[in-house]
Image: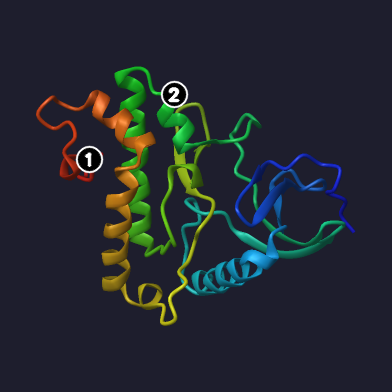
């Protein structure tokens, strides 16, 4: 049995806590701590979607792989890739990166990350419940290369998961979520700071491929 109760979680969400795997630095363990409020249901939904992805997905660079369960002193643990930078530091969230943007170079990196994220979702037909900056990690794989990684809210909760099986429905849902995503304060403030005066506060401009 793996002991986690004495560890400080790497992160805590609405239903789950994420811990470093004590035996494998490349993995993390998620524990449901709020099962009575939908935590177990959320985990089942996510694992069902991971099973769907395993049938076709070749490029796992934008989401953590899932490796099965382990027994811990906090209950059943679900093992995923740990998203850690090349130098061993935890990858920062996109919201933290955006709030720290101070120069035009920083904002250029932010725009590039957003382009990469949008392209990855589209090309690999990835469905998410929601898309939030705090659920996207900026994974620095070298001194010069950073990849966006979605770490939560993967999959969909609809009774008939049309977006999981139809590219058309998938891309349509992605576009709706992207419009809301790009307008969230953490991103909008950073992007508007570098936008031309005529484009500021224009939702269409913020949601365009320039973002």
Mark 2 and mark 1 lie on one chain; the one further toward the N terminus is 2
Residue at image point 62% right, 35% down: 90
User: In front: 109, or 47?
Assistant: 47
How far across and down, in percent of the image, does residue 210 sit? 21, 39
User: In front: 85, or 39?
Assistant: 39
* Residue furthest to the left: 198
How far apart are labels 2 and 1 at the CA level?
A: 19 Å
Q: Which numbered marker is on residue 119?
A: none
Label 2 close to label 1 by CB (< 8 Å): no
Q: Quadrant of residue 6?
A: top right
Disc 1 packing (10 Å; few <14; some 14–19; many ≥20) = many
Residue at image point 61% right, 50% down: 13
Up the image or down, 22 lies above or below 100; here it is below
Q: Is residue 22 left or right of residue 184?
A: right
How far across and down, in percent of the image, does residue 160 sit? 41, 82
Residue at image point 50% right, 69% down: 53
How far across and down, in percent of the image, does residue 42 sit? 58, 67
* Residue furthest to the right: 1
Q: Which numbered marker is on residue 206?
A: 1
Which residue matches tag 2?
Answer: 100
Q: Is residue 30 left or right of residue 155?
A: right
Q: Is residue 57 left or right of residue 86?
A: left
Q: Is residue 55 left or right of residue 87?
A: left
């Amino acid at each position: 049995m793996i002991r986690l109760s004495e560890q400080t979680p790497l992160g805590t969400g609405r239903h789950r806590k994420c811990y470093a795997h004590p035996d494998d630095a490349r993995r993390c363990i998620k524990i449901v701590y709020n099962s009575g409020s939908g935590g177990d249901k959320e985990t089942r939904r996510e694992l069902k979607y991971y099973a769907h992805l395993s049938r076709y997905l070749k490029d796992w660079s934008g989401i953590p792989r899932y490796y099965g369960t382990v027994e811990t002193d906090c209950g059943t643990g679900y093992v995923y890739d740990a998203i850690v930078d090349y130098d061993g530091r935890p990858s920062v969230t996109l919201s933290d990166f955006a709030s720290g943007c101070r120069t035009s170079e920083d904002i250029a990196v932010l725009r590039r990350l957003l382009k990469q994220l949008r392209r990855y979702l589209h090309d690999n037909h990835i469905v998410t419940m929601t898309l939030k900056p705090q659920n996207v990690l900026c994974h620095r794989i070298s001194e010069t290369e950073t990849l966006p990684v979605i770490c939560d809210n993967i999959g969909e909760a609809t009774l008939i998961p049309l977006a999981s099986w139809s590219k058309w429905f998938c891309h349509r849902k992605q576009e709706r979520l992207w419009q809301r995503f790009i307008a969230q304060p953490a991103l909008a403030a950073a992007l508007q700071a570098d936008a031309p005066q005529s484009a500021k506060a224009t939702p269409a401009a913020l949601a365009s491929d320039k973002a």
